[in-house]
Image (cartoon, rainbow, N blue to C red):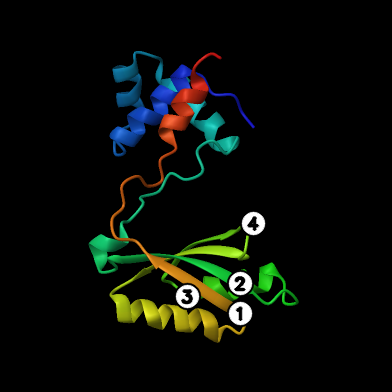
Amino acid sequence: MMLVDALDAKIVRFFTDSPRSSVLEASRVLRVARATVQSRIDRMIENGVIGSWVPQPDPANFGFPVVAFCSVTITQEIGHDAIIESLSAIPEIIEVHTVTGNSDLMVRIAARSNPDMQRVLDAMIATKSVVRCSSVIVLNSHIQGRTLPLMEAAAKPV
């Protein structure tokens, strides 16, 4: 774990708002040395604060507008690693999380249509590692992948 400060949060906010900008541009806008911006970025990457520096494509904008969250019950004797490996082979599966409660996994899926969603669910069942799957289709997304406000809050003195 790494403690973040206000400058770290400002740097991440800058690149969130202007992802194609350079470190030099960030240093000009934020009024700090270029080396400071670069070293802060390097430190945040090294400590896992910034987990990815890649584009995040939106499935709806390239043909996969239907999103569902599925509660998945798995066969316990196979083990999570083998199940995750078989689910990873299905490209429509965007996220998989081990969870507590009545199911074992929470899976986020993107599909081309409702019938296509059924095909993906059938593909999950066909892995022979899924015992039961209960899905809910997303009607509208309001907040997604929102971690920057949390980082900004963490950077404020307590």
Quarter of the rendering occupied by the C terminus: top right
Q: Residue 90 — which label?
A: 3
The Cα atoms of the two marked residues, 1 and 3, are separated by 17 Å
Of label 2 and label 4, which has the lower sequence position?
Answer: 2
Three-letter residue code for mark 2: Thr
The Cα atoms of the two marked residues, 4 and 1, are separated by 16 Å
Q: Which residue matches tag 1?
A: 131
Three-letter residue code for mark 1: Val
Quarter of the rendering occupied by the N terminus: top right
Q: Secondary structure at mark 1?
A: strand
- Depth check, mark 3 against mark 4: the one in front is 4
Give yes or no for contact between labels 2 and 1 (Cβ–Cβ under 8 Å). yes
The Cα atoms of the two marked residues, 2 and 4, are separated by 11 Å
Q: Position of residue 157 (x, y in %)?
A: 53, 13
Q: Which residue matches tag 2?
A: 73
Towards the viewer: 73 or 14? 73
Give yes or no for contact between labels 2 and 4 (Cβ–Cβ under 8 Å). no
Give yes or no for contact between labels 4 and 1 (Cβ–Cβ under 8 Å). no
Q: Which residue matches tag 4?
A: 100
The Cα atoms of the two marked residues, 3 and 4, are separated by 23 Å
Of label 2 and label 3, which has the lower sequence position?
Answer: 2
- What's the residue at 57%, 77% (across, down)? 132
Of label 4 and label 1, which has the lower sequence position?
Answer: 4
- The image shows residue 8, relative to residue 62, as above or below, that is above
Q: Position of residue 60 (x, y in %)?
A: 27, 62
